Amino acid sequence: ATVEPGVVFDLRQGAVVIDQGAEVRSGTRLEGPLYVGPGTRVLGGFLRGSVFGPECRVRGEIATSVFLGFANKSHDGFVGHSIVGQWVNLGAGTTTSNLKNTYGPVRLEVDGERIETGRLNVGSLIGDHAKTAIGTMLATGTVISAGANVFGPATPPKYIPPFAWGCSGDERMSEDGFLRVAERVMGRRNVSFSPDRREALRRAYQRSTR
């Protein structure tokens, strides 16, 4: 791993683990417990109490969150109490709210069903291959389904369906369009878009858009 000069480690609450091939750039503050996965690049900011899987690119303020791997958050913006799936791209300035103004428990809304979490702090749940536009402001307890491409209103609805195109209607990405984008994104991390991988994603698309 590579750690540039000027990185601060705060170990008072737990260890900071930096895995093989990871890079932490100057101007970063790491507060444990924290795990930085293989090949992940931490580009600056304040990270605490979080887990970053392999080959992520992260920057800004990130707290109590899990990035499953190959996710991209290369710019400023706050992400807290959130789960970020694989191959997610968060546009510059994307910010999550993780606490209601009323300080009450957070309720999720998933495809018309309300789920009481019983928790005061819940950020966003973001599925694999989802993407947000620059300046996206996610309300407390937002759920973005897999493959969704979120743009339009600065604050989208609290539930975005799978493979949505925008967030103000029922429009969906086409199957071919989704697969083309996935192939481009994976190529940027030197991951082969094999026939088996393509078929798995095609089936996931078809299951979710019936």
Image (cartoon, helix red, strand yellow):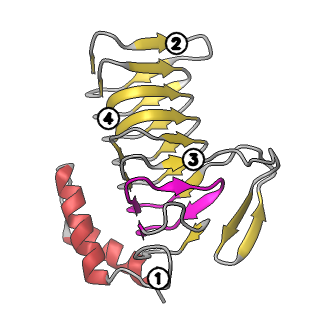
Residue that carries the numbered disc 1 in the rendered image: 207
Q: Which residues are magenta?
A: 126-151
Instruction: Say whether disc 1 or disc 3 marks the residue closer to the N-terminus.
Output: 3
Q: Is residue 86 left or right of residue 1?
A: right
- The numbered disc on residue 90 is none
Which secondary structure lies at badge 4?
loop
Crowd tier of the residue under label 2, counting other residues whose Cα lies within 10 Å: few below 14, some 14–19, many 20 or above: some
Which residue sits at x=46%, y=20%? 30
Residue that carries the numbered disc 2 in the rendered image: 10
* Residue 28 lies within the magenta run: no
- The numbered disc on residue 40 is 4
How far separated are the C-alphas under marks 1 and 3? 25 Å
Crowd tier of the residue under label 4, counting other residues whose Cα lies within 10 Å: few below 14, some 14–19, many 20 or above: many
Task: Please state which amino acid type lies under the numbered disc 1.
Answer: Arg
Crowd tier of the residue under label 3, counting other residues whose Cα lies within 10 Å: few below 14, some 14–19, many 20 or above: many
How far separated are the C-alphas under marks 3 and 4? 18 Å
Task: Please state which amino acid type lies under the numbered disc 4.
Answer: Thr
Task: Please state which amino acid type lies under the numbered disc 3.
Answer: Ser
Judge by depth and name the residue closer to the eye, 66 or 167: 167
**Residue 132 pos. (x, y %):** 41, 59
Q: Quadrant of residue 147?
A: bottom left
Judge by depth and name the residue closer to the eye, 155 or 147: 155
* Residue 128 lies within the magenta run: yes
Q: Are marks 4 and 1 in contact (CB under 8 Å)?
A: no
- The numbered disc on residue 82 is 3
Q: Are marks 2 and 3 in contact (CB under 8 Å)?
A: no
Which secondary structure lies at badge 3?
loop
